[in-house]
Image (spheres, helix red, strand yellow):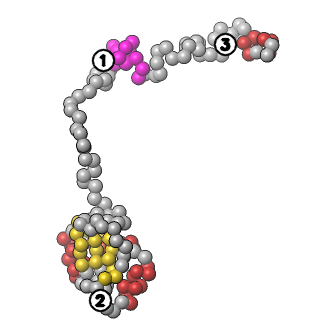
Amino acid sequence: MPSRLRKTQKLRGHMSHSHDPIGKHQKHPGGHGNAAGGTHHRKINFNKYHPGYFGKVGMRHYHLKRNQSFCPTVNLDKLWTLVSEQTWVNAAKNKTGAAPIIDVVLLGYYKVLGKGKLPKQPVIVKAKFFSRRAEEKIKGVAGGLCPGGLKPHRVRFIKC
């Protein structure tokens, strides 16, 4: 390309040649932003205004168990909404005393709480934990509890 068509010719007389007059098109000699140079040429600033920003304190915790208190809950009034409508219909029709198993652990809940009412339909609930009122209400409708329900099961009918 001939030099008369290059942008450099048009920029003669403009001191910075369309680059930032402070940086002067010299990459990043001071670093990127405020974080760069904190341990070198901006050390005084960091020591004065951000004491303790750099360095480590204390000991590492190996094998840290996070979310030990993770315990998603579900109430009794929402229990039958977790299974299909077909299961509900089959349970209502069944006269042999078989009760459907609802494994709430499989559905992402760990604890069953006692808010709401259960229909007069026996049901077996598998969960890691039950509140006292939830236990009473499930047993009140001739249902069963399986604490610590971790094995993968589908909702199915069994003889009580």
Q: Residue at x 41, y 85 (%)?
A: 89
Question: Residue type at mark 1?
Answer: Asn
Amino acid type of the residue tagged 2 in the rendering? Gly
Residue with the mark numbered 2? 97
Residue located 39% across and 82% down the image: 88
Which stretch appears magenta? 35-46
Q: The N terminus lies in which quarter of the figure?
A: top right
Disc 3: which residue: 17
Q: Which sits earlier in the primary sequence, circle 3 or circle 2?
A: 3
Q: Secondary structure under badge 3?
A: loop
> Which of the image's four quarters has the C terminus?
bottom left
Where 50 falls versus 160 (above or below)? above
Q: Eyeballing the image, is 42 above or below 149?
A: above
Mark 2 vs mark 1: in front: 2
Question: How far across and how far down the image is residue 54, in percent?
Answer: 31, 23
Q: Quadrant of residue 146?
A: bottom left
As measured in the structure, the alpha-carbon distance from the residue carrying label 3 to the one carrying label 2 is 88 Å
Q: Quadrant of residue 26 in the image?
A: top right
Q: Position of residue 51 (x, y in %)?
A: 28, 22
The residue lying furthest to the bottom in this view is 95
Q: CA distance from mark 2 to mark 1?
A: 75 Å
Magenta segment's dominant SS is: loop
Report if the CB atoms under discs 3 and 2 are less than 8 Å apart. no
Nearer to us: label 3 or label 2 = 2
Task: Give, as a three-letter code, the residue at label 3.
Answer: His
Instruction: Name the spot of residue 4 as percent of width and height, x first.
Output: 80, 12
Q: Circles 1 and 3: CB distance less than 8 Å?
A: no
Q: Is residue 58 shown above or below 130?
A: above
Q: Residues within 10 Å of mark 1 (few under 14, many from 20)?
A: some
| Mark positioned earlier in the residue sequence (1 or 3) | 3
Classify 10 Å Cα crowding around label 2: few (below 14), some (14-19), many (20 and above).
some
Left or right? Give the position of 85 relative to 24.
left
